[in-house]
Image (spheres, coloured by chain):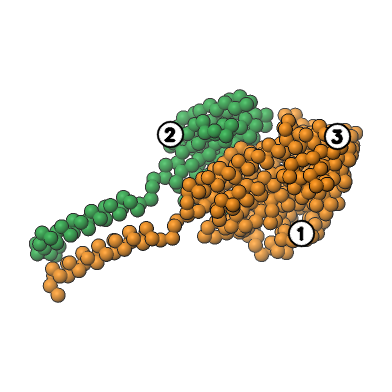
Amino acid sequence: MALTSLWRRTRPFDRVVVLLLFILCAVLFVVLRPGPPGRRVVVEAAGRVVFTAPLDQDRSFIVTGPLGETRLAIRHGSVCIEASPCPHRVCLGMGAITRSGEILACVPNGVLVRITGTASTGDRTEPYDLLSR
Amino acid sequence: MSTRRLLHLLVLLLLATALGAACKSQGAPAKLVEVRRSQLLMGTVVEIIARGPDRPRLETAVDGAFAELARIEKLMEPHGLDSDVGRLFKAGIFLEVSPDTAAVIAQGLKVATASGGVFDMGLGRLKELWDIEGEHPQPPSAAAIAQALAGTGLGDLQLNGRVVQKRDPGLVVDLGGIAKGYGIDRAIGVLAAAGVEHASINAGGDIRLLGNRGNRPWRIGIQHPRHPGEILATIDLADTAVVTSGDYERFYERDGVRYHHLFDPRTGQPGRLCQSVTVVAPEAVLADALATAVFILGPQAGLELLARFRGVEGLIVAADGTSVTTPGLADQVKWR
């Protein structure tokens, strides 16, 4: 009620000013808001990006390296190596990765899988930045 | 004051606040952006993180750092036809090598001498014999080990300027325990020369840091040697190198005995006194060599060795799982 009464007492110029204020707020919101997370799986073979896909769309993909075919699967927001021709299958034992910045690698077959996205550090839960092992 | 004037004042105040916020956003100190890229190099995943206000500059610097790592890899790959290590394999007694390879060997020889020869760059034949990462590794016979150790030991390699001298023409030089550290030292130099102030390079757990993370030190997690996926401790560090050597990365087990890739040149067997050794040093090439040497020497002699190097600290997990640190690291380690 108080607002209605106030609005009635305004002149056209006042209303223009209020309108400009709203427009300014809308512009600032669009310009200054953070971007969407947009996490993606990026696969490299022999140092070149050979495949990239959103992490939220299930699919599988085969990468060919010097030893043969490495099969990757994106399932339920995570990616893992499902099959590999490498001798020790260390890459299979690395399990699935879900967070931006995490990496899977099959060194013998030259395949590197990582998750990228603007949420790269915001969603990390590890209590460290780098792991020495 | 009339209601209209009050309204005008309120609107102007809101406009001023909004404009002020926008101006502050534009005029604030530049926000740090992060470039994070990985490549397979030197037999492992190398990840470079560079942080700064200027993304194009960071991208260019990271390109240069990876190129430098690739150059060092080519020089020191074990079986490269044109690599210095490959040429050393084929060489008789003397061979002139590149300044980079000479620098690596010089640093390795310092640690070899200080450690009484337990760090040995002439163990290539022994490593091939054990073939820890092969498809069907088996512990070799004592005779085969003795044969692989022939010609090794203190003085097996000497360096005069850029000329390497092998005591035995059959000596197989292996820089695997030290070249990766040298590579990341060189790469961090490229980043620094390009004006990057905050960066890290992680080559399969061998880490070199440039500056801090931007607003705080880098927090380094140390892998637990017996619980995969868990960390033993964290250490906050800046502008230094951290390298961990352990018996849990490359190993196999037979009859309850763990056979791993860190060999004692005195016996030809995998070292048995430690589970893991983490060394913090000004340069990764030094940390790399010292971590291997301390792993073989064990906690007591290892701490004594570390004390002989300025600016070097360490965390040692002994074979029984107990941990010790150098005095300088004791207050910095946060156990998990």
Where residue B89 sits in the image (x, y, percent)? Answer: 80, 34
Q: Nearer the viewer, mark 2 or mark 1?
A: 1
Number of marks in the rendered image: 3
Q: Amino acid at mark 2?
A: Gln
Where residue B113 sits in the image (x, y, percent)? Answer: 84, 52
Could you give the CA–CA distance between mark 2 and mark 1, rounded to whole angstroms? 53 Å
Q: Please state the chain letter of the residue tagged with numbered disc 2 in the rendered image.
A: A
Q: Please state the chain letter of the residue tagged with numbered disc 3 in the rendered image.
A: B
Which residue matches tag 2?
A57
Q: Earlier in the sequence, mark 1 or mark 3?
A: 3
Residue at x-position 33% and y-position 59%? B22
Could you give the CA–CA distance between mark 1 and mark 3, rounded to whole angstroms? 34 Å
Which residue matches tag 1?
B309
Q: Please state the chain letter of the residue tagged with numbered disc 1 in the rendered image.
A: B
Q: Residue furthest top?
A: A68
**Left or right, A30 with reference to A21:** right
**Left or right, B99 with reference to A9:** right
Which residue matches tag 3?
B92
Colour assignment, chain B = orange
Could you give the CA–CA distance between mark 2 and mark 3, rounded to whole angstroms? 58 Å
Q: Which mark is residue B35?
A: none
Dot 2: element: loop
Where residue B293 sits in the image (x, y, percent)? Answer: 79, 50
Q: Nearer the viewer, mark 2 or mark 3?
A: 3
Q: Which chain is green?
A: A
